[in-house]
Each structure stands twice: as structure tokens, then as C-alpha cells.
Image (cartoon, rainbow, N blue to C red):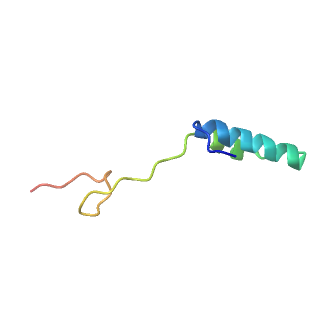
Amino acid sequence: MKPDRNKEESNLTYLEEAEEKQGSKLPENVREKADKPTKLPKKKRAGGKESYRPLQRN
């Protein structure tokens, strides 16, 4: 299977295939996670601090 351009769509189709193989529905929370786009890791600054932390100036 070649990588899908739409990540969310490929997640959902993967879940649907798994449901068919299992013969039962997967838990709702798993399906909700697949609906949401994946979180990107936080970008780090040169100093190694996470970007969500504001720089403190004196």
C-alpha cells in the first residue's frame, strides 16, 4: 500500500478494514482519534527550549 496523501483518510480506511477483519466495531474513542489530525511535535529553539515557552527578557 502506497502512502496516502490524506493522512486522516488513510487512518479511517485502515480502521474500517480492521473492523471488517474483526467482525465488530472498534471502540468509539479509537475512531475519534483517527478523525483528528495528528499532532505535530513541538519545535525547539536553538537553546533547546520548547517554542511554547516565551523568552524571558530582563
Q: Residue furthest bottom?
A: 48
Q: Residue furthest front?
A: 2
Quadrant of image for the C terminus: bottom left
Residue sitting at x 65%, y 45%: 2
The quarter of the displayed image where residue 49 is located: bottom left
Q: Is residue 48 left or right of residue 26?
A: left
The quarter of the displayed image where residue 34 is located: top right
Q: Is residue 58 left or right of residue 20?
A: left
Residue sitting at x 74%, y 44%: 15
Q: Is residue 36 left or right of residue 26?
A: left
Measured as percent of width and height from the top left, residue 45 is found at 27, 57
Measured as percent of width and height from the top left, residue 28 is found at 74, 42
Residue sitting at x 67%, y 42%: 11
Residue sitting at x 73%, y 39%: 13
Residue 32 visible in the picture: no
Residue 50 visible in the picture: yes
In-front residue for pair 37/54: 37
